[in-house]
Amino acid sequence: MSLKGKTLFITGGSRGIGEAIAMRAARDGANVVIAAKTAEPHPKLPGTIYSVVEAIGKAGGQGLPIICDIREEQQVAEAVKQAANKFGGIDILVNNASAIGLTGTLQTDMKRYDLMNGINARGTYMTGKYCIPYLQKSGAAGRNPHILTLSPPLDMRSKWFAPHVAYSMAKYGMSLCTLAWAEEFRRDGIAANSLWPRTGIATAAIKLIGGDPLMKKSRTPEIMADAAHVILTQPSREFTGHFCIDDVVLHDMAGVRDFSKYLAVPGTKESELMPDFFLPDNLPKYS
C-alpha cells in the first residue's frame, strides 16, 4: 500500500485536489511530476508548479515542475518525455486538469466551450495518448501502472446536461476515456479508473467563487487524495474500469468510518454539505 519509488505524472497539480494527491504520494517517497500552466503566482489563488515541487521535496518525495498547457500537443509530448527521462519512466497518470463553466447553451460562448473541451476531454485523451506507451513499459516490468481521471460516473439523464451541456460534455468526455482505456489496455496490465467527490471540495478556487458559505458546505481536498491513494495502490490487473466516489472508496476499501477530519469547517453536519454534480441516486450514505 505504498507509492514509494513510483513516478506520477499529474496534470494541473499546482493547487487544490491535484496538489493534495501529489503531497499524499510524496509522503510515500514517490516521484511526482507537476505539469501545469501556473509558473507565476496568481493574484488571488495560491500555488505554482515550483511551490508544489518544493513542498513535495520537504514531504519526502522528488518533484519535477514542468510548464505545460495540455491543449498544446507539442507541450504535452515534451513534458511526458522530460518526465520519463528524469525518472526512468512513468507509472501513474493522474488526469486532474479541468475547466468549468456552468452556463446554458445560449450563455456559453464558443471560447469557453473550446476551453472546457480542450482541457477536459481533449487534454485528458492527449495526455493519455503520450503517457500510455510508458505505462505499458511499467506494466511489462510489473510496476502496477494506473491511470486515474478526476471525472464523474457516466449517467445519461438529461438533468445532468440541460443546465450546462458544454461542461457536461467535457467532463463526460474524460469519463469515456476511462471506460475505453480500461478495456483497451487491460492486457497491458494498465488500470484505468475515475474518481469523483460526493461533496463540494474546499479549494482556493471554490472560496474565491463562493466565499466562506460555500467552504462550510465542502470537504477538504485530502479526502480525494486519500481515496486516490487507495485506488492507485490496488493491483492494476484487478481493479480497473471503476467510477469511484471518494468516501465510498474510503469506507468500503480502507475501513474509514469517521469522515469528520475532512470537513473544511469543523463541526459542520454531514447534512449541510453540498452534493456535487453527476452523483447517482443510489449512492450509499455514511453519517
Image (cartoon, rainbow, N blue to C red):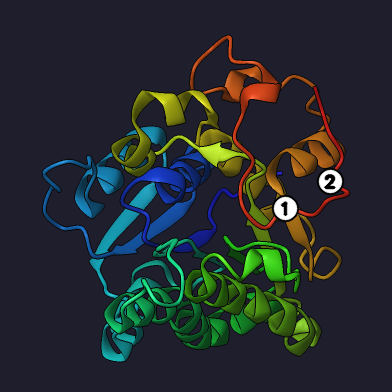
Residue at left offset 65%, top offset 65%: 160
Q: Give amino acid for label 2.
A: Leu
Above or below: residue 199 compared with residue 166: above
Coordinates of residue 30 in the picture (x, y in percent): 49, 50
The answer to which quarter of the image holds residue 112 is bottom left
Residue 144 visible in the shown view: no
Q: Give amino acid for label 1.
A: Leu
Coordinates of residue 90 in the picture (x, y in percent): 50, 71
Q: Nearer the viewer, residue 149 or 196?
A: 196
Residue designated by label 2: 283
| Badge 2 element | loop
Coordinates of residue 3 in the picture (x, y in percent): 59, 50
Coordinates of residue 11 in the picture (x, y in percent): 40, 65
Give the alpha-carbon distance from disc 2 to disc 1, as whole Å.
7 Å
Side (left or right) of 205 relative to 243: left
CB of mark 2 within 8 Å of CB of mark 1?
yes
Residue at left offset 11%, top offset 44%: 43
Query: 10 Å neighbourhood of mark 1: few (<14), some, or many (≥20)?
Result: some
The answer to which quarter of the image holds residue 23 is top left
Residue at left offset 52%, top offset 45%: 25
Residue designated by label 1: 279
| Badge 1 element | loop
The answer to which quarter of the image holds residue 66 is bottom left
Q: Quadrant of the N terminus?
A: top right
